[in-house]
Amino acid sequence: MSDHFTRSFVAKVVDTERKAGGPNGNPRYLVTFDNGQKMFTPYDCAMAYGITNPEYKTQAHRFGLTKRGTLNGYDEIAE
């Protein structure tokens, strides 16, 4: 397990829904996880581009959270 995130959870992505983009026009997604959580990707981040890749639906990953509980990134494949 990586200690990159102080708060995190392990899950697979079930669905992604493209929402209105950020101020710079980059995509933002509403992500549904297999644990029932729904969260938005941050504005203007690379995570928004990667989260739609098939590997996030077939393999569980560790997702980092901010202190407010919003997505902050993703890390290695969880075993």
Image (cartoon, grey):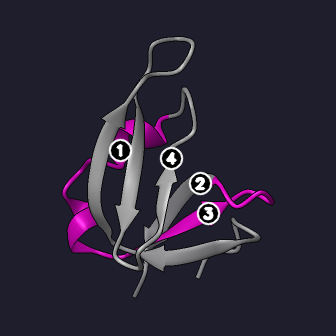
Question: Can see residue 59?
Answer: yes
Could you classify mark 2 by the number of other residues whose Cα lies within 10 Å: few (under 14), some (14-19), or many (20 or more)? some
Q: CA distance from mark 4 to mark 2?
A: 7 Å
Which badge, 1 or 3, is on the more N-terminal residue?
A: 1
Instruction: Give percent across and percent down for residue 77.
Output: 40, 73
Which badge, 4 or 3, is on the more N-terminal residue?
A: 4
Q: CA distance from mark 1 to mark 3?
A: 14 Å
Q: Do labels 3 and 2 touch, CB within 8 Å?
A: yes
Q: Residue at x 42, y 24 (%)?
A: 20
Q: Residue at x 45, y 22 (%)?
A: 21
Answer with the quarter of the image where residue 64 lies: bottom right
The quadrant of the image that shows the N terminus is: bottom right
Q: Do labels 4 and 2 touch, CB within 8 Å?
A: yes
Instruction: Give percent across and percent down for residue 48.
Output: 42, 38
Amino acid type for the residue under numbered disc 1: Gly
Left or right: 7 as drawn, with respect to 26: right
Q: Which residue is mark 3?
A: 64
Q: Which residues are magenta?
A: 46-70
SS assignment at label 2 = strand
Q: Do labels 1 and 4 touch, CB within 8 Å?
A: no
SS assignment at label 4 = strand
Which badge, 2 or 1, is on the more N-terminal residue?
A: 1
